[in-house]
Amino acid sequence: MKTQVAIIGAGPSGLLLGQLLHNAGIDTLIIERQSPDYVLSRIRAGVLEQGMVDLLREAGVGARMDREGLVHDGFELAFDGRRERIDLKAHSGGKTVMVYGQTEVTRDLMDARQASGAPTIYNASEVQLHDLKDGQPSVTFVHQGVSQRVSCDYIAGCDGFHGVSRQAIPEGVLREFERVYPFGWLGVLADTPPVNHELIYANHERGFALCSMRSPTRTRYYVQVDAGEKVEDWSDERFWDELKRRLPDETAERLITGPSIEKSIAPLRSYVVEPMQYGNLFLLGDAAHIVPPTGAKGLNLAASDVNTLFRILLKVYREGRTELLERYSEICLRRIWKAERFSWWMTSMLHRFPDADPFSVRMQQTELDYFVSSAAGRCTIAENYVGLPYEDIE
């Protein structure tokens, strides 16, 4: 088998890259170790930056998103007995975000991939990458009991933190940066109407809480829990009671509860590897970086990686600009570190840390007060939340 770009992983980043390249006439093969149903079962992010929304439209997969997604012009910060709305549209030059679940993005991309006839191999095992720096790259795998090899020009590693792509890079090449936070998010998905028409991020003495949504009839709520907590110890009743305690009184009174559809605890960490490429292998999304979900940047950072690699490969195949390949990592990392900073800031400002003393708590409250009391501060929050612009490839 032979293709131009082999994509490892059929999550949203791999599928989006594949769709953009296919539309541009560049051959791709997507290789995924899980089944389609498993990929769709992942409950993940739901807030899309303006840049990702525009990229999905460019890929021709934005129709259902535009029909069913919820455009949000702002969000609220609740702290110190206050509710402060950040007007995204007013403070970011007219930009907004779209509330549309990652599962729905993935489903739209899967449908588009199938309709295009471009090949995707699911349930692939023993995936290995070869000749990444010297010779022609290739990928070997086993599918339905048959060993196969695909030769390619380039490999896009879109297979997440635990995938084979980053592990295929020799030891000593990558430098890792990591911060593990001493708490997690207990999340509940429920078929209940949202308590507010926009997201609410709450800083409370009992810990952080977030009121989010997937649609006008489906909600996603979170509360901060200790790192060692177990999901089975949290009944629905205990979760709703704890969430109410952390919300402003008038918000808690309006909260409509119901049985959970899904309940899970996600650990929080910040993680980046440098560089994000090795020879003809390029890392995208969680394979190269992870952010705590507080700033809603994980899926959006993966999309910006996709945008960068797609624009570079267009110039490589259409103009022979192979020198641009060496710039992939530096271009991506400039945006990634800024998003890491914003996610770290949001996490640091809104959560209660186990070792926080009274001074630290006061500084946290003062930091939030300063930013929401300043037009410049509100602009800083807004421009980061809607997403910093993608860098042009010249």
Image (cartoon, rainbow, N blue to C red):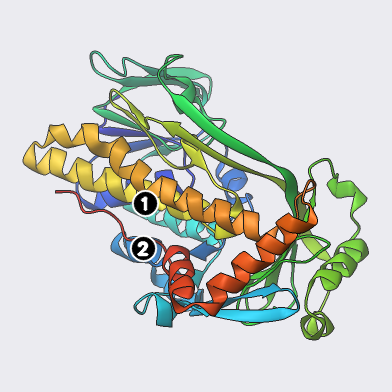
Taking depth in this image into account, of 366 and 128 the one nearest to the observer is: 366
| Residue corresponding to mark 1 | 304
Residue 142, placed above or below residue 254:
above
Which residue type carries mark 1? Ser
Whether residue 324 is visible: yes
- Taking 373 as reference, is 319 left or right? left
In the structure shown, which secondary structural element does the residue marked by tag 2 occupy? Answer: helix
Residue at 85% in and 45% down: 229
- Taking 146 as reference, is 309 left or right? left
Answer few, some or many: residues within 10 Å of disc 1's Cα (few below 14, many 20 plus, some between 14 and 19). many
For the residues labelled 1 and 2, say whether their Cβ atoms are less than 8 Å apart.
yes
Q: Position of residue 218 (x, y in %)?
A: 68, 72
Furthest-left residue in this view: 319
In the structure shown, which secondary structural element does the residue marked by tag 1 occupy? Answer: helix
Furthest-front residue in this view: 359
Examine the image and state in which quarter residue 351 appears.
Answer: bottom right
Residue 261, placed above or below residue 268:
below
- Residue 51 badge: 2
Taking depth in this image into account, of 310 and 142 the one nearest to the observer is: 310
Which residue type carries mark 2? Gly
Residue at 53% in and 61% down: 104
Q: Position of residue 183 (x, y in %)?
A: 75, 46
Quadrant assignment for the N terminus: top left
- Taking 147 as reference, is 393 left or right? left
Q: Position of residue 382 (x, y in %)?
A: 46, 71
Taking depth in this image into account, of 100 and 73 the one nearest to the observer is: 73
